[in-house]
Image: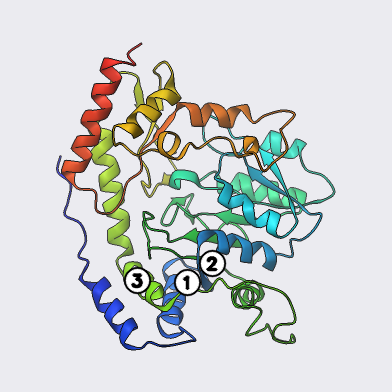
Amino acid sequence: MNLPPAPDRAPLLQEMTASLSAMPDPAASGHLRMFEDEAAHALGTAHAVAVSSGTAAVHAALSACGIGPGDEILVPALTVIMTVAPLRALEATPVFVDSDPATLDLDYEDAARKVTARTRAIIPVHLWGRMGDPGALAAFASEHGLAVVEDAAQAVGTVRNEQLAGAVGMVGCFSMKDGKILWSGEGGFLTTASGQVAEHARAFRSHWQPAPPGEAPHSRLATNSRLAAPLAALALANLRRLPDLIERRRAQTRYLLNALEQVPGLTALAPGADEEWNGFSPLLHIGLPRARAFAEHLAQQGVPNSTGSFRLVPCDTRPPFPTPEQPCRGTAEILDRTLAIVLAEGDTQATLDHYADVVARAAAAAWAP
């Protein structure tokens, strides 16, 4: 099995040159407008709004959904702190929900127990590009009258039950940080079918200007979270390569999982039968003793991964939040037992062979059952 060559990068230089030749451009509008139009078309939605990061996309989306002081928002503990930070900025309260180790999806029984009269929205997080059951999500949100703001930062291109990640709820939020499949170094965007949400988000990213119809500029406090013109040019060039970039990541993930197939104690976590996964990160269940220590050892040996490199833990246990009375144990099990290897577009076959060799040697030498 051979890894196909990486997609051509020449279009990136062409768009960057075009962007720089148009600067200074205080409005940064040319490539930004093209990116938003083409992103909306590519993802099958009416509107896309580009911002400075995936966190900024979540922030603008929640504001556009009317989230504010005193509101409670259901959010999986199986996420990073960047998902939750905008809630605190809006003075809303995150209510952490557990996940099912068998599916990686939300534990909807736990979610139902945590709904109160103050619950306004739910933020499903498609971590590692994996997407939960969109039907279950829509039904739960409808039953409890909740807005759905999807954190699809890592899930561009993933489809389940013929629904794209980011298109199940009111708003889908994406990151374009370096390392994402669709990248611009830094950046993000949100997608929505609602013109009202899009107008709010565009105003919110630029100190409430241009204001939505019927409102005055600067009549609300907002943010400076615009996407810089050169980054918009990179985003546009990569958007036009998106099918190739997704296939590249899927091929890398298939290659590495195939190379690790015979390693004792590691089992690939396959997507659901109804899920067309973007392959964001090769996922393996660690059946070895001291699983988290194994992941940390691999990180020290140069194999980047979620728990070993970035110390990913259940978000409900992070210091900014009150100590939970009942920790999300399913989430802890998922994170302790999942090896999620971090990939990048430029990872070559030699890189992946090296990763596979390091993992296999570590499993055989020190962590064998």
325 left or right of 362 in image = right
Question: Residue at horizontal 24%, vertical 32%?
Answer: 356
Asked where in the image residue 361 lies, by quadrant, the reply is top left
Going from N to C along the chain, the mark reached first, 1 or 2, is 1
Front position in the image: 201 or 302: 302
Q: Which residue is mark 1?
A: 40
* Labelled pair 1, 2 in contact (Cβ < 8 Å): yes
30 left or right of 163 in image = left
What amino acid does circle 2 point to? Thr
What amino acid does circle 1 point to? Ala
Task: In the rendered view, tell whether residue 43 sits above or below residue 272.
Answer: below
Q: Which residue is mark 3?
A: 234
What x and y, as percent, mark residue 225?
Answer: 55, 71
Mark 3: few/some/many CA within 10 Å (<14, 14-19, 20+): many
Question: Residue at horizontal 78%, vertical 43%?
Answer: 115
Q: Which residue is mark 2?
A: 191
